[in-house]
Image: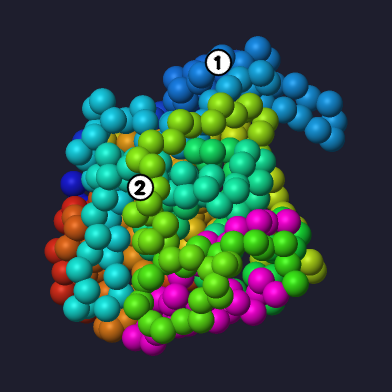
Amino acid sequence: MEKFVIKKGKVFWPSEEMKERAWISDEKIYKIADKNPIKFWSKLSLEGISWFKKWKNAYVSKPPYFKWFVGGKLNASYNCLDRHLETRKNKVAIIWEPEPLEERERILTYYQLYKEVNKFANVLKDLGIKKGDRVTIYLPMIPEAQIAMLSCSRIGAIHSVVFSAFSSEALKTRIIDAKSKVLITADGYYRRGQLINLKESADEAVKGTSIEKVVVVKRAGDEVNMQEGRDFWWHELMKKAKSYCKPEVMDSEDILFILYTSGSTGKPKGICHSTGGYLTQAYWTAKWDFDLHDEDIFWCTSDLGWITGHSYACYGPLLNGATILIYEGAPDYPQLDRWWEIIEKYGVTIFYTAPTAIRMFIAFGDEWVKKHDLSSLRLLA
């Protein structure tokens, strides 16, 4: 990392080499944005996003309401996948690292991810899901979580991702509020060497809710209760699914997803994110904030159940045609250098994590970091 930064006291500054190749290397961009923010974002929306139909008005404000890119038509899944097939078909889209050391990683190219998303989009349609319906996703950090999100967006269904460590009661509250018809979950997953039975929590949560169908990913291969007529195995549905699903034409202001607040200050609030504005923001913040380039391997450690995970472990990097790494397990299991081991293994170039995690690793001591070659890293966030 030494060639990318220069240390002056306790502050690290970008080197000349890093500044020369950066998308933004000075403060001009702030002045341009400040001078005319509507013009600024209008230009960016056309440069970063593929529109089926260009919008008429970039911004309409009627306090307390506002709209972005009014009249524009697009699709999130198309922007993350289809438009990359000509130039990035065989590029790696997702690298998945499991917690158990004896298990193999999974790697999906853009074409493989595209095929999986098309098939699962058709699975959702076969289950009766249509444009505007809500689908709750209660999955660990496995590729099926991103596949489910992109499949929903492909057919115009609104996804609501719930953090897999949340209780059945927390899941139930969010299902009821969203009025979801389908729940996507898994049999279980691994955390600190323990097999967590996720299906058990899901079964408890769906009682007395609007859920009609439950799709279960066989992640752990554990014995779980499957209710006939309601519960279906992901892999069995995928075997029968058609290979292509035409992306739904969505209005810029159509809801892409609902994401709930943590509930620490009362009842969780469902925040609705519209398609055009969110995708524009996710594309450019991923590209500029992290100086994201085509050759980068981007690892955001956030769970997909949070907005950070939505934007930087799914939509933002995929909109840019980048490679994402996701990891199933705990940062310090089976040893305190698990994260550094993963960075070295895959040559991660951008590493985005929480200050809490950094403080934890500082307490562990430098020896765990020094065991590994982390020279691939050029940006920490």
Residue 258: x %, y % from top left: 65, 50
Judge whether residue 97 can be spotted in this image. Answer: yes
Residue at image point 61% right, 16% down: 55
User: In what element is the residue under mark 1?
Assistant: loop
Q: CA distance from mark 1 to mark 2?
A: 26 Å
Residue at image point 37% right, 57% down: 143
39 in relation to 241, above or below: above
| Magenta stretch: includes residue 328 | no
Which picture quadrant has residue 268?
bottom right
Which of labels 1 and 2 is toward the front?
Answer: 2
Residue 316 falls left or right of residue 334: right
Q: Residue furthest bottom?
A: 194
Q: Which residue is mark 1?
A: 53
Dots 1 and 2: beta carbons under 8 Å?
A: no
The residue type indicated by label 1 comes to Lys
Residue nearest the viewer, comparing 102 with 28: 102
The residue type indicated by label 2 comes to Glu
Q: Which residue is mark 2?
A: 116
Label 1, residues with CA under 10 Å away: few <14, some 14-19, many ≥20: some
Residue at image point 78% right, 25% down: 61
User: In what element is the residue under mark 2?
Assistant: helix
What is the magenta range?
179-207
Which picture quadrant has residue 64?
top right
Q: Earlier in the sequence, mark 1 or mark 2?
A: 1
Residue 349 falls left or right of residue 150: left
Residue 286, numbered label: none
| Magenta stretch: includes residue 195 | yes
80 in relation to 159, above or below: above
